[in-house]
Amino acid sequence: CSTLFPHPPLFPSPPRAWVIVRDTGQPHEKKQPFVSLNGYAFQFQKNVPIQLPIPVINMMKNCIFTKTERDEETGAEYTRDIPRFSIERLDHAPDGVSENPA
């Protein structure tokens, strides 16, 4: 708050959680994925503990890609949905890292 704007912001920062986004080994996968939610962009490195807003984590849990495959015996095509991100939620900040970085 400042003297010019004495009230807190209308939209406070959402709660955050520590996560590790694991490499899934898919051929299309990027080492530093870019995600965006409601105009806020995030780019991060995989396999490293990071702190993300919980709404972003929830969105990433719902991201999928659809893979089309062919059955070798029957020749029939079928599709399956595969999670785009493998997310491990941490109970606390990693050792040596502040719980609330600036």
Image (spheres, rainbow, N blue to C red):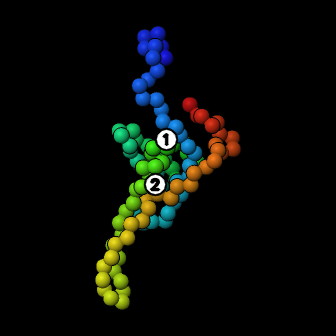
CA distance for labels 2 and 1: 13 Å
**Residues packed near mark 1 inside 10 Å, few (<14), some (14 to 19) or many (20 plus):** some
> What is the x, y in percent for residue 60?
44, 52
Counting labels gives 2
Amino acid type indicated by mark 2: Lys
The reply to whether dot 2 and dot 1 touch (C-beta < 8 Å) is no
Residue placed at 46% from the left, 54% from the top?
61
* Residue at 44%, 23% in the rendered image: 9
Crowd around label 2: few <14 · some 14–19 · many ≥20 (10 Å)? some
74 to the left or right of 18: left
Is residue 92 among the parts visible in the rendering? yes
User: Mark 1 or mark 2, which is nearer the start of the sequence?
Assistant: 1
Residue that badge 1 annotates: 53
- Toward the top, the furthest residue is 3
Give the structural element (helix, strand or loop) at label 1. strand
Q: Give the numbered dot on residue 61.
A: 2
Q: Is residue 101 above or below residue 6?
A: below
Q: Within the image, what quadrant is residue 5 found in?
A: top left
On-image quarter of the C terminus: top right
Task: Please tell me which residue lies in front, 81 or 39.
Answer: 81
Residue depicted at 35% across the width and 66% down the height: 66
The residue type indicated by label 1 comes to Pro
Q: In the picture provided, is 43 more to the left or to the right than 73?
A: right
Query: Residue 93 location, x and y as percent?
Result: 64, 43
